[in-house]
């Protein structure tokens, strides 16, 4: 059939009408999609995009000598200050803490997630609920509970004293901060890992073993690559909040070292330097965004 | 929570850019006891006896509408967003900022005869020398809470209790220092013999070195739980504000083990002040209220209710002995108000960040 024949055939009407119908359907679909998404879209624009825009605008503003923010004389001074060695030192310390926390979380969570994923459906559900239980109470309350556990009145110190040793205070040390952060963010690592391992087709391992792969080789060549999306998602979920951690270092670490979160807060509350505080916040955000994109891309290539 | 407040403040500041009020109000025509409308009173929460408010309403036949704020910055943002208040209670440094920004009405002392009751100390402060725009409301100090059972009876009344490593090394639990750049850099500056408001960068670097050398025995930098850390024996010495410290010691199981002292090198004085914003619609009523609170007995009632120290010299005989005892030391101690140092403020914050590194 030639195109001309087609146009003249009785089906012609239908053939011409279909694209229109399809377009209408697509439009209706898009409208419905927009309607469904609009509450969250509205929420995100109002409480995320607009405030973020304000922070961005403020980062180019000027601090008056009385500590007010002048929305004029736009400049890059706040961004220039980011190259101050003090800022670099603080950023490096936060980076180190976030990396250590993420690494420990990963090391602890992987075996746990693996164990969970290889149990029967019933046991899995129970273990899953157990991992979620900490979320039933407030993070701040749980962090304060650690204050008691790690202080001189706590069980660790009391056991030490019962054994004839000195009282031990872990509270107000970097170790206490690390314990608190790993404790707080562990579920964020376990859950994505569990999700990716649970979906795994275990016959792939059997096939590998049939081809004389050792247990380690099978893990390295099969399990690990398959669980990589979980590793990446979990690492990002732990790394980003710990980089800006404020509450845990203050409550468990006694704010004894300046970290990014603490430094940004002091710009707003003590120095009343909103432009610099905004620039700091925005720089952290931008670096995280770029790092996340690179991480995702490299992760995707490994799959 | 702080982040939420911050967002609110930011939004309010943006709104402020669109508002603004240039009406100049004159207080010159107000006479003593004259009222010109209801009083919109913007104050810190839990800071005034409700019975005092009722007494004022009954005496002058006006209503007092109370609103409350949690920080000077929040109050400023609200005011700049265009909301009108007749009386506010800014702290010392905020008074200076508001004067500089032209946000306060010059007081007409003829309408405040009770201003004569004000202790002289509160009319010569650098944030408003001569008390042209503000009248002190209540005051307090920043000093040291000491656990005598851990430190011993024989201790120096000095910032050495925080910063001398040879001394603090013997304190079980170490010491707690405020997580506040101006207070803590100021304490270290005073320990070195400089002013709390010193703006010499070399002196500031010396102060950084003092804190770094003392850091091994500084258990925590804390501005919220210093009082609890002291009375539970977590730390031996605690740097903090008089009001909270005195309340915590009073409520402790063994209050005799604790004392609140002001170091001899000098300590911080903070003053909250009554002031009238330029967008006030009842300037004369505001003057009448200031005069009312500066009355000897009313001033005493205020202090007996909120336990902070009174700048009202005439009120002393009417104040409960217990409250007077708490605040007695401040009358004679060397005290200095923290003065806003403009652009130099950034150096205090960075020095503090560096000291904690």
Image (tube, rainbow, N blue to C red):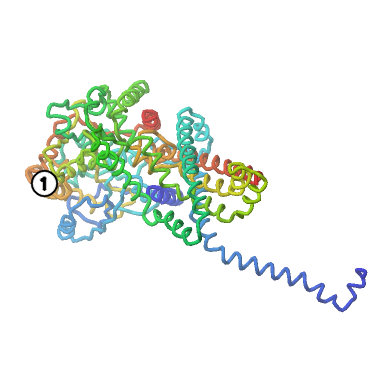
Q: What residue do we see at 13% from left, 40% from top?
A: B326
**Quarter-of-image position of residue B95:** top left
| Figure label count | 1
* Horizontal arrangement in the rendering, residue A235 relative to residue B170 (left or right): right
Residue in front for this viewpoint, A19 or B326: A19
**Quarter-of-image position of residue A32:** bottom right
- What is the chain letter for disc 1? B
Residue in front for this viewpoint, B299 or B356: B356
Question: Which residue of the protein is positioned furthest toward the bottom in this rendering?
Answer: A10
**Whole-percent x and y of residue B235?**
23, 35
Q: Which residue is mark 1?
A: B296
Quarter of the picture containing the N terminus of chain A is: bottom right
Q: Secondary structure at mark 1?
A: helix
Above/below status of B50 relative to B145: below
**Whole-percent x and y of residue A133?**
40, 56
Q: What residue do we see at 18% from left, 32% from top?
A: B262
Q: What residue do we see at 20% from left, 50% from top?
A: B31
Can residue B139 be seen from the camera position used here? Answer: no
**Whole-percent x and y of residue A89?**
46, 30
* Horizontal arrangement in the rendering, residue B198 relative to residue A164 (left or right): right
Can residue B222 be seen from the camera position used here? Answer: yes
Residue in front for this viewpoint, A278 or B164: B164
* Horizontal arrangement in the rendering, residue A263 relative to residue A165 (left or right): right
Rate crowding at label 1 as few (under 14), some (14 to 19) or many (20 or more) other CA atoms within 10 Å.
many
**Whole-percent x and y of residue A74?**
53, 38
């Amino acid at each position: 059939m030639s195109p001309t024949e087609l146009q003249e055939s009785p089906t012609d009407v239908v053939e011409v009408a279909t694209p229109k119908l399809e377009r209408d359907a697509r439009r209706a679909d898009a409208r419905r999609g927009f309607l469904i998404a609009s509450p969250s879209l509205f929420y995100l624009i109002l409480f995320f995009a607009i405030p973020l825009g304000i922070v961005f605008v403020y980062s180019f503003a000027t601090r008056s000598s009385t500590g007010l923010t002048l929305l004029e004389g736009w400049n890059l001074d706040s961004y220039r200050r980011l190259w101050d060695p003090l800022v670099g030192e603080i950023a490096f310390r936060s980076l180190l803490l976030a990396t250590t926390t993420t690494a420990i979380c990963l090391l602890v969570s992987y075996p746990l997630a693996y164990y969970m994923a290889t149990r029967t459906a019933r046991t899995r559900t129970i273990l899953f609920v157990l991992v979620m239980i900490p979320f039933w109470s407030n993070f701040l309350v749980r962090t304060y509970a650690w204050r008691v556990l790690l202080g001189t009145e706590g069980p660790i110190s009391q056991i030490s004293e019962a054994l004839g040793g000195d009282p031990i205070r872990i509270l107000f040390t970097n170790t206490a901060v690390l314990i608190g952060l790993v404790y707080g963010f562990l579920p964020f690592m376990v859950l994505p890992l569990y999700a990716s391992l649970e979906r795994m087709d275990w016959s792939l391992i059997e096939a590998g073993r049939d081809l004389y792969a050792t247990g380690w080789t099978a893990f390295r060549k099969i399990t690990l690559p398959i669980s990589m999306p979980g590793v990446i998602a979990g690492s990002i979920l732990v790394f980003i909040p710990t980089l800006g951690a404020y509450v845990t270092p203050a409550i468990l670490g006694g704010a004894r070292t300046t970290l990014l979160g603490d430094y940004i807060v002091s710009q707003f509350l003590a120095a009343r330097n909103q432009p610099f505080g905004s620039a700091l916040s925005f720089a952290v955000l931008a670096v995280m965004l770029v790092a996340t994109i690179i991480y995702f891309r490299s992760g995707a290539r490994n799959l | 929570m702080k982040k939420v407040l911050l967002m609110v403040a930011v939004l309010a500041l943006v709104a402020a850019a669109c508002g603004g009020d240039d009406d100049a109000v004159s207080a010159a025509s107000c006479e003593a006891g004259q009222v010109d409308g209801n009083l919109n009173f913007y104050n810190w929460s839990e800071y005034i006896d409700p019975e005092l408010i009722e007494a004022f309403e009954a005496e002058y036949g006006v209503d007092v509408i109370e609103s409350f704020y949690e920080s000077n910055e929040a109050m400023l943002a609200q005011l700049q967003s265009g909301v009108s208040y007749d009386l506010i209670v800014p702290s010392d440094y905020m008074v200076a900022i508001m004067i500089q920004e032209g946000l306060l009405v010059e007081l007409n002392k003829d309408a405040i005869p009770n201003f004569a009751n004000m202790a002289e100390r509160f009319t010569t402060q650098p944030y408003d020398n001569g008390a042209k725009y503000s009248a002190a409301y209540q005051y307090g100090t920043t000093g040291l809470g000491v656990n005598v059972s851990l430190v011993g009876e024989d201790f120096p009344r000095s910032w050495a209790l925080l910063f001398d490593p040879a001394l603090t090394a013997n304190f079980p639990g170490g010491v707690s220092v405020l997580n506040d750049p101006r207070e803590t850099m100021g304490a270290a500056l005073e320990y070195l013999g400089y002013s709390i408001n010193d703006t010499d960068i070399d002196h500031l670097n010396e102060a950084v070195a003092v804190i770094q050398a003392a850091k091994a025995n500084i258990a925590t930098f804390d501005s919220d739980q210093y009082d609890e850390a002291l009375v539970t024996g977590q730390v031996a010495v605690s740097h903090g504000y008089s009001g909270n410290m005195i309340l915590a010691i009073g409520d402790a199981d063994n209050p005799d083990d604790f004392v609140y002292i002001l170091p001899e090198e000098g300590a911080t004085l903070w003053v909250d002040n009554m002031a009238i914003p330029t967008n006030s619609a009842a300037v004369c009523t505001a003057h009448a209220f200031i005069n009312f609170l500066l009355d000897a007995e009313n001033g005493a009632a205020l202090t007996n209710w909120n336990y902070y120290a009174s700048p009202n010299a005439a009120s002393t005989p009417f104040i409960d002995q217990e409250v007077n005892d708490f605040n007695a030391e401040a009358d004679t101690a060397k005290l200095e108000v923290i003065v806003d140092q403009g652009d130099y403020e950034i150096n205090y914050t960075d020095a503090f960040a560096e000291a904690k590194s």
